[in-house]
Amino acid sequence: MTTSNHNHQKCIRTALCQAEALCKARAQRLTPIREQVLRSVWSSHKAIGAYSIIDALAKQSSKPPAPPTVYRALDFLLDNGLIHRVNSLNAFIGCNAPGHQHNSQLLICRRCSNTTELVSEALNSQANKAAKQENFVLEQTCVELTGLCETCSREIAHDE
Amino acid sequence: MTTSNHNHQKCIRTALCQAEALCKARAQRLTPIREQVLRSVWSSHKAIGAYSIIDALAKQSSKPPAPPTVYRALDFLLDNGLIHRVNSLNAFIGCNAPGHQHNSQLLICRRCSNTTELVSEALNSQANKAAKQENFVLEQTCVELTGLCETCSREIAHDE
DNA sequence: CAAATAATGCAATATTATAACATATCTTCT
DNA sequence: AGAAGATATGTTATAATATTGCATTATTTG
Ligand SMILES: [Zn+2]
Ligand SMILES: [Zn+2]
Ligand SMILES: [Zn+2]
Ligand SMILES: [Zn+2]
Protein backbone atom coordinates (compact mmCIF):
# COMPACT_ATOMS: atom_id res chain seq x y z
CA MET A 1 0.00 0.00 0.00
CA THR A 2 3.00 2.27 -0.08
CA THR A 3 2.88 4.52 -3.08
CA SER A 4 6.01 2.89 -4.39
CA ASN A 5 5.16 -0.78 -4.67
CA HIS A 6 2.06 -0.57 -6.77
CA ASN A 7 0.67 1.15 -9.81
CA HIS A 8 -0.78 4.17 -8.16
CA GLN A 9 -1.90 5.73 -11.43
CA LYS A 10 -4.40 2.94 -11.51
CA CYS A 11 -5.69 3.84 -8.03
CA ILE A 12 -6.22 7.40 -9.21
CA ARG A 13 -7.94 6.41 -12.44
CA THR A 14 -10.25 4.03 -10.63
CA ALA A 15 -11.16 6.60 -8.02
CA LEU A 16 -11.94 9.23 -10.62
CA CYS A 17 -13.96 6.86 -12.75
CA GLN A 18 -16.02 5.74 -9.80
CA ALA A 19 -16.54 9.32 -8.71
CA GLU A 20 -17.68 10.32 -12.16
CA ALA A 21 -20.07 7.39 -12.39
CA LEU A 22 -21.51 7.97 -8.93
CA CYS A 23 -22.06 11.66 -9.49
CA LYS A 24 -23.71 11.00 -12.79
CA ALA A 25 -26.02 8.43 -11.23
CA ARG A 26 -26.97 10.87 -8.48
CA ALA A 27 -27.21 13.94 -10.70
CA GLN A 28 -24.42 15.57 -8.76
CA ARG A 29 -21.87 17.73 -10.50
CA LEU A 30 -18.24 16.71 -10.32
CA THR A 31 -16.99 20.16 -11.28
CA PRO A 32 -13.36 20.87 -12.23
CA ILE A 33 -12.48 22.09 -8.76
CA ARG A 34 -14.08 19.12 -7.09
CA GLU A 35 -12.24 16.80 -9.41
CA GLN A 36 -8.93 18.56 -8.80
CA VAL A 37 -9.43 18.29 -5.05
CA LEU A 38 -10.31 14.62 -5.38
CA ARG A 39 -7.18 14.13 -7.45
CA SER A 40 -5.08 15.82 -4.76
CA VAL A 41 -6.58 13.62 -2.09
CA TRP A 42 -5.71 10.62 -4.19
CA SER A 43 -2.19 11.82 -4.94
CA SER A 44 -1.03 9.29 -2.37
CA HIS A 45 -2.36 6.94 0.26
CA LYS A 46 -1.45 9.41 2.97
CA ALA A 47 -4.11 11.60 4.48
CA ILE A 48 -3.78 15.15 3.21
CA GLY A 49 -4.71 18.37 4.97
CA ALA A 50 -6.90 21.04 3.39
CA TYR A 51 -4.04 23.50 3.17
CA SER A 52 -1.78 20.96 1.51
CA ILE A 53 -4.48 20.57 -1.09
CA ILE A 54 -4.45 24.33 -1.56
CA ASP A 55 -0.67 24.18 -2.05
CA ALA A 56 -1.01 21.36 -4.53
CA LEU A 57 -3.63 23.20 -6.56
CA ALA A 58 -1.56 26.38 -6.44
CA LYS A 59 1.09 24.63 -8.50
CA GLN A 60 -1.41 23.85 -11.20
CA SER A 61 -2.72 27.34 -11.78
CA SER A 62 -1.69 30.94 -11.40
CA LYS A 63 -3.48 31.68 -8.16
CA PRO A 64 -3.97 29.37 -5.20
CA PRO A 65 -7.61 28.67 -4.46
CA ALA A 66 -8.98 30.33 -1.33
CA PRO A 67 -9.70 28.07 1.65
CA PRO A 68 -13.49 28.17 1.25
CA THR A 69 -13.15 26.92 -2.29
CA VAL A 70 -11.27 23.84 -1.17
CA TYR A 71 -13.38 23.26 1.93
CA ARG A 72 -16.54 23.40 -0.14
CA ALA A 73 -15.17 20.85 -2.54
CA LEU A 74 -14.15 18.66 0.40
CA ASP A 75 -17.65 18.96 1.85
CA PHE A 76 -19.11 17.88 -1.45
CA LEU A 77 -16.79 14.88 -1.63
CA LEU A 78 -17.55 13.95 1.99
CA ASP A 79 -21.30 14.25 1.45
CA ASN A 80 -21.04 11.96 -1.53
CA GLY A 81 -18.90 9.42 0.28
CA LEU A 82 -15.96 9.87 -2.07
CA ILE A 83 -13.52 10.74 0.70
CA HIS A 84 -13.28 10.27 4.45
CA ARG A 85 -12.19 12.76 7.04
CA VAL A 86 -9.40 11.50 9.29
CA ASN A 87 -10.39 13.12 12.55
CA SER A 88 -7.24 12.31 14.43
CA LEU A 89 -5.18 14.12 11.78
CA ASN A 90 -7.55 16.85 10.61
CA ALA A 91 -7.00 15.50 7.15
CA PHE A 92 -8.68 13.66 4.31
CA ILE A 93 -8.28 10.36 2.52
CA GLY A 94 -9.88 8.88 -0.55
CA CYS A 95 -12.58 6.29 0.00
CA ASN A 96 -11.81 2.85 -1.35
CA ALA A 97 -15.37 1.79 -1.84
CA PRO A 98 -17.51 4.80 -2.62
CA GLY A 99 -21.09 4.02 -3.36
CA HIS A 100 -21.30 1.31 -0.77
CA GLN A 101 -22.33 3.62 2.02
CA HIS A 102 -20.22 2.78 5.02
CA ASN A 103 -18.55 4.23 8.05
CA SER A 104 -14.91 4.90 8.08
CA GLN A 105 -12.56 2.40 9.64
CA LEU A 106 -8.97 3.41 9.13
CA LEU A 107 -5.52 2.03 9.82
CA ILE A 108 -3.09 4.92 10.12
CA CYS A 109 0.64 4.33 10.13
CA ARG A 110 2.36 6.81 12.42
CA ARG A 111 5.67 6.33 10.63
CA CYS A 112 4.91 6.51 6.90
CA SER A 113 1.44 8.06 7.29
CA ASN A 114 -0.12 5.65 4.85
CA THR A 115 -3.75 5.16 5.67
CA THR A 116 -5.68 2.05 4.75
CA GLU A 117 -9.38 1.62 4.83
CA LEU A 118 -10.76 -1.42 6.58
CA VAL A 119 -14.12 -2.95 5.96
CA SER A 120 -14.77 -5.10 8.99
CA GLU A 121 -18.39 -6.03 9.32
CA ALA A 122 -17.59 -7.62 12.68
CA LEU A 123 -16.12 -4.39 13.98
CA ASN A 124 -19.10 -2.50 12.70
CA SER A 125 -21.55 -4.83 14.31
CA GLN A 126 -19.78 -4.62 17.66
CA ALA A 127 -20.06 -0.84 17.49
CA ASN A 128 -23.77 -1.16 16.81
CA LYS A 129 -24.15 -3.60 19.63
CA ALA A 130 -22.30 -1.42 22.10
CA ALA A 131 -24.42 1.59 21.16
CA LYS A 132 -27.61 -0.41 21.44
CA GLN A 133 -26.74 -1.55 24.93
CA GLU A 134 -26.69 2.08 25.99
CA ASN A 135 -29.90 2.81 24.09
CA PHE A 136 -27.89 5.13 21.93
CA VAL A 137 -29.17 5.87 18.44
CA LEU A 138 -26.04 5.40 16.40
CA GLU A 139 -25.73 7.61 13.35
CA GLN A 140 -22.05 7.70 12.55
CA THR A 141 -19.11 5.58 13.58
CA CYS A 142 -15.52 6.64 13.39
CA VAL A 143 -12.82 4.07 13.97
CA GLU A 144 -9.22 5.19 13.64
CA LEU A 145 -6.50 2.70 14.47
CA THR A 146 -3.02 4.10 14.76
CA GLY A 147 0.23 2.17 14.82
CA LEU A 148 2.73 0.74 12.37
CA CYS A 149 1.93 -0.68 8.97
CA GLU A 150 3.48 -4.00 8.02
CA THR A 151 6.27 -2.41 6.01
CA CYS A 152 7.24 0.07 8.70
CA SER A 153 7.16 -2.45 11.50
CA ARG A 154 9.54 -4.65 9.51
CA GLU A 155 11.84 -1.76 8.75
CA ILE A 156 11.96 -0.72 12.38
CA ALA A 157 12.68 -4.28 13.48
CA HIS A 158 15.47 -4.41 10.92
CA ASP A 159 17.02 -1.17 12.14
CA GLU A 160 17.46 -2.42 15.67
CA MET B 1 -25.77 10.83 32.32
CA THR B 2 -27.09 14.34 31.81
CA THR B 3 -25.57 16.70 34.31
CA SER B 4 -28.99 17.27 35.82
CA ASN B 5 -30.16 13.84 36.87
CA HIS B 6 -27.24 12.79 39.00
CA ASN B 7 -24.97 14.08 41.69
CA HIS B 8 -22.26 15.50 39.53
CA GLN B 9 -20.27 16.84 42.44
CA LYS B 10 -19.59 13.22 43.22
CA CYS B 11 -18.28 12.62 39.68
CA ILE B 12 -15.88 15.51 40.16
CA ARG B 13 -14.72 14.42 43.58
CA THR B 14 -14.14 10.89 42.39
CA ALA B 15 -12.19 12.02 39.35
CA LEU B 16 -9.96 14.29 41.39
CA CYS B 17 -9.35 11.68 44.06
CA GLN B 18 -8.41 9.10 41.48
CA ALA B 19 -6.15 11.56 39.71
CA GLU B 20 -4.40 12.45 42.92
CA ALA B 21 -3.91 8.82 43.85
CA LEU B 22 -2.64 7.86 40.41
CA CYS B 23 -0.19 10.73 40.21
CA LYS B 24 1.11 9.95 43.66
CA ALA B 25 1.60 6.31 42.76
CA ARG B 26 3.49 7.28 39.62
CA ALA B 27 5.46 10.12 41.17
CA GLN B 28 3.81 12.57 38.83
CA ARG B 29 2.93 16.05 39.96
CA LEU B 30 -0.71 17.09 39.85
CA THR B 31 0.11 20.77 40.03
CA PRO B 32 -2.54 23.47 40.69
CA ILE B 33 -2.89 24.27 37.00
CA ARG B 34 -3.21 20.65 36.03
CA GLU B 35 -5.81 20.14 38.70
CA GLN B 36 -7.75 23.22 37.60
CA VAL B 37 -7.73 22.02 34.01
CA LEU B 38 -8.89 18.58 35.10
CA ARG B 39 -11.66 20.22 37.09
CA SER B 40 -12.73 22.21 34.02
CA VAL B 41 -12.79 19.09 31.93
CA TRP B 42 -14.97 17.47 34.56
CA SER B 43 -17.28 20.46 34.90
CA SER B 44 -19.77 18.48 32.84
CA HIS B 45 -20.06 15.33 30.78
CA LYS B 46 -19.75 17.34 27.60
CA ALA B 47 -16.44 17.45 25.81
CA ILE B 48 -14.76 20.80 26.31
CA GLY B 49 -12.40 22.64 23.98
CA ALA B 50 -9.04 24.00 25.08
CA TYR B 51 -10.15 27.59 24.68
CA SER B 52 -13.29 27.01 26.73
CA ILE B 53 -11.00 25.76 29.46
CA ILE B 54 -9.01 28.96 29.16
CA ASP B 55 -12.24 30.94 29.52
CA ALA B 56 -13.26 28.91 32.53
CA LEU B 57 -9.92 29.42 34.25
CA ALA B 58 -10.01 33.12 33.42
CA LYS B 59 -13.02 33.49 35.68
CA GLN B 60 -11.11 32.03 38.58
CA SER B 61 -8.11 34.31 38.48
CA SER B 62 -7.14 37.76 37.35
CA LYS B 63 -5.48 36.81 34.08
CA PRO B 64 -6.51 34.07 31.69
CA PRO B 65 -3.82 31.43 31.24
CA ALA B 66 -2.02 31.48 27.90
CA PRO B 67 -2.83 28.67 25.46
CA PRO B 68 0.46 26.79 26.00
CA THR B 69 -0.23 26.62 29.71
CA VAL B 70 -3.52 24.87 29.15
CA TYR B 71 -2.26 22.69 26.32
CA ARG B 72 0.64 21.52 28.45
CA ALA B 73 -1.70 20.62 31.26
CA LEU B 74 -3.91 18.76 28.79
CA ASP B 75 -0.90 16.89 27.47
CA PHE B 76 0.01 15.85 30.97
CA LEU B 77 -3.52 14.64 31.66
CA LEU B 78 -3.62 12.78 28.34
CA ASP B 79 -0.26 11.15 28.98
CA ASN B 80 -1.47 9.97 32.34
CA GLY B 81 -4.73 8.66 30.99
CA LEU B 82 -6.82 11.05 33.07
CA ILE B 83 -8.63 12.51 30.08
CA HIS B 84 -9.35 11.52 26.50
CA ARG B 85 -9.16 13.65 23.42
CA VAL B 86 -12.34 13.64 21.35
CA ASN B 87 -10.87 13.83 17.89
CA SER B 88 -14.10 14.45 16.06
CA LEU B 89 -14.72 17.55 18.19
CA ASN B 90 -11.21 18.80 18.88
CA ALA B 91 -12.13 18.64 22.52
CA PHE B 92 -11.48 16.78 25.73
CA ILE B 93 -13.41 14.60 28.14
CA GLY B 94 -12.60 13.14 31.54
CA CYS B 95 -11.72 9.46 31.65
CA ASN B 96 -14.09 7.30 33.61
CA ALA B 97 -11.61 4.63 34.49
CA PRO B 98 -8.14 6.13 34.72
CA GLY B 99 -5.49 3.74 35.78
CA HIS B 100 -6.92 0.88 33.82
CA GLN B 101 -5.04 1.76 30.69
CA HIS B 102 -7.48 1.56 27.85
CA ASN B 103 -8.33 3.04 24.51
CA SER B 104 -11.07 5.52 24.14
CA GLN B 105 -14.48 4.38 23.00
CA LEU B 106 -16.93 7.21 23.11
CA LEU B 107 -20.63 7.74 22.54
CA ILE B 108 -21.19 11.36 21.55
CA CYS B 109 -24.67 12.85 21.47
CA ARG B 110 -24.97 15.36 18.65
CA ARG B 111 -27.90 17.06 20.36
CA CYS B 112 -26.91 17.52 24.00
CA SER B 113 -23.19 16.92 23.50
CA ASN B 114 -22.97 14.56 26.44
CA THR B 115 -20.21 12.08 25.90
CA THR B 116 -20.15 8.68 27.52
CA GLU B 117 -17.23 6.35 27.69
CA LEU B 118 -17.78 2.77 26.67
CA VAL B 119 -15.69 -0.14 27.75
CA SER B 120 -16.49 -2.85 25.26
CA GLU B 121 -13.95 -5.61 25.31
CA ALA B 122 -15.67 -7.16 22.29
CA LEU B 123 -15.28 -3.96 20.30
CA ASN B 124 -11.68 -3.70 21.37
CA SER B 125 -10.92 -7.25 20.37
CA GLN B 126 -12.51 -6.79 16.94
CA ALA B 127 -10.28 -3.79 16.41
CA ASN B 128 -7.26 -5.86 17.35
CA LYS B 129 -8.38 -8.64 15.08
CA ALA B 130 -8.92 -6.34 12.14
CA ALA B 131 -5.48 -4.79 12.59
CA LYS B 132 -3.84 -8.16 12.92
CA GLN B 133 -5.36 -9.34 9.66
CA GLU B 134 -3.54 -6.52 7.91
CA ASN B 135 -0.34 -7.24 9.85
CA PHE B 136 -0.71 -3.84 11.38
CA VAL B 137 0.94 -3.21 14.75
CA LEU B 138 -1.86 -1.54 16.63
CA GLU B 139 -0.81 1.05 19.16
CA GLN B 140 -3.83 3.22 19.69
CA THR B 141 -7.48 2.81 18.91
CA CYS B 142 -9.97 5.62 18.67
CA VAL B 143 -13.64 4.78 18.44
CA GLU B 144 -16.08 7.67 18.35
CA LEU B 145 -19.75 6.87 17.92
CA THR B 146 -21.98 9.83 17.17
CA GLY B 147 -25.75 9.93 17.34
CA LEU B 148 -28.46 10.55 19.90
CA CYS B 149 -28.32 9.60 23.55
CA GLU B 150 -31.32 7.86 25.05
CA THR B 151 -32.70 11.04 26.58
CA CYS B 152 -32.39 13.08 23.41
CA SER B 153 -33.84 10.41 21.17
CA ARG B 154 -36.89 10.22 23.43
CA GLU B 155 -37.28 13.98 23.50
CA ILE B 156 -37.06 14.19 19.75
CA ALA B 157 -39.62 11.42 19.33
CA HIS B 158 -41.91 13.26 21.73
CA ASP B 159 -41.60 16.54 19.85
CA GLU B 160 -42.85 15.06 16.61
C1' DC C 1 23.44 25.10 49.15
C1' DA C 2 24.43 24.15 44.16
C1' DA C 3 23.21 21.85 40.11
C1' DA C 4 19.98 19.63 37.50
C1' DT C 5 15.32 18.89 36.26
C1' DA C 6 10.62 20.02 35.73
C1' DA C 7 7.02 23.30 35.27
C1' DT C 8 5.22 27.76 34.07
C1' DG C 9 4.96 32.56 31.89
C1' DC C 10 4.87 34.97 27.83
C1' DA C 11 4.94 36.65 22.98
C1' DA C 12 4.56 35.46 18.63
C1' DT C 13 2.94 32.63 15.09
C1' DA C 14 1.28 28.42 12.73
C1' DT C 15 -2.57 25.63 11.32
C1' DT C 16 -7.29 24.54 10.48
C1' DA C 17 -11.89 26.17 9.44
C1' DT C 18 -15.88 29.29 8.68
C1' DA C 19 -18.86 33.62 7.89
C1' DA C 20 -20.68 36.90 4.87
C1' DC C 21 -21.53 38.67 0.64
C1' DA C 22 -20.69 39.33 -4.39
C1' DT C 23 -20.42 37.15 -8.82
C1' DA C 24 -20.73 33.62 -12.12
C1' DT C 25 -22.56 29.39 -14.04
C1' DC C 26 -25.88 25.99 -14.84
C1' DT C 27 -30.76 24.22 -15.07
C1' DT C 28 -35.49 24.59 -15.95
C1' DC C 29 -39.36 26.32 -17.82
C1' DT C 30 -41.82 29.22 -21.03
C1' DA D 1 -33.61 31.89 -27.05
C1' DG D 2 -34.68 34.35 -22.68
C1' DA D 3 -35.97 34.87 -17.88
C1' DA D 4 -36.06 32.97 -13.29
C1' DG D 5 -34.31 30.15 -9.95
C1' DA D 6 -30.92 27.23 -8.13
C1' DT D 7 -26.22 25.89 -7.68
C1' DA D 8 -21.41 26.81 -7.54
C1' DT D 9 -17.45 29.80 -7.14
C1' DG D 10 -14.64 34.12 -5.93
C1' DT D 11 -13.07 37.15 -2.35
C1' DT D 12 -12.10 39.17 2.01
C1' DA D 13 -11.93 38.84 6.50
C1' DT D 14 -11.90 36.43 10.67
C1' DA D 15 -12.68 32.57 13.98
C1' DA D 16 -11.00 28.54 16.33
C1' DT D 17 -7.43 25.39 17.43
C1' DA D 18 -2.57 24.48 18.36
C1' DT D 19 2.56 25.06 18.57
C1' DT D 20 7.40 27.22 18.80
C1' DG D 21 10.93 29.39 21.24
C1' DC D 22 12.83 31.45 24.91
C1' DA D 23 12.82 33.50 29.65
C1' DT D 24 11.68 32.61 34.39
C1' DT D 25 10.33 30.11 38.45
C1' DA D 26 9.72 26.09 41.33
C1' DT D 27 11.06 21.49 42.69
C1' DT D 28 14.04 17.67 43.28
C1' DT D 29 18.52 15.63 43.85
C1' DG D 30 23.08 15.19 45.46
ZN1 LIG E 1 -2.48 3.57 -4.79
ZN1 LIG F 1 4.06 2.76 7.58
ZN1 LIG G 1 -21.38 13.46 36.42
ZN1 LIG H 1 -28.21 13.86 24.15
Image: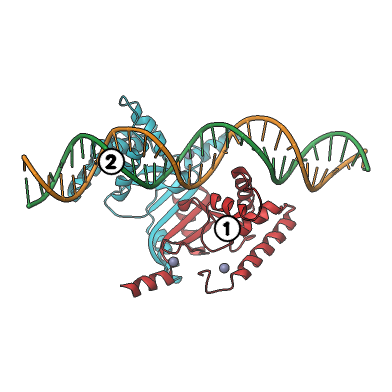
Chain colours: A red, B cyan, C orange, D green
The mark found on residue B15 in the picture is 2
Residue A94 visible to an observer of this rendering? yes
Q: Is residue B133 left or right of residue A27?
A: left
Residue B96 visible to an observer of this rendering? no
**Residue at horizontal 23%, vertical 41%?**
B30
- The amino acid pointed to by label 1 is His
**Disc 1 secondary structure class:** loop
- The amino acid pointed to by label 2 is Ala
Q: Quadrant of ligand 2?
A: bottom left
* Above or below B111: residue A38: below
Residue hosting label 1: A102
- For the residue pair A132 and A140, the one nearer the viewer reads as A140
The image quarter containing residue B58 is top left
Quarter holding the C terminus of chain A? bottom left
x%, y% of residue A77? Answer: 63, 53
The chain to which mark 1 is attached is A
Question: Does ligand 1 reach within 8 Å of label 1's beta carbon?
Answer: no
- For the residue pair A158 and A90, the one nearer the viewer reads as A158
The count of marks equals 2
The mark found on residue B80 in the picture is none
The chain to which mark 2 is attached is B
Q: Crowdedness of circle 1 by 10 Å Cα count: few (<14), some, many (20+)? A: some
Q: Is residue B155 left or right of residue B29?
A: right
The image quarter containing residue B62 is top left
* Above or below A137: residue A16: below
**Disc 2 secondary structure class:** helix
Tag 2 and tag 1 share a subunit: no
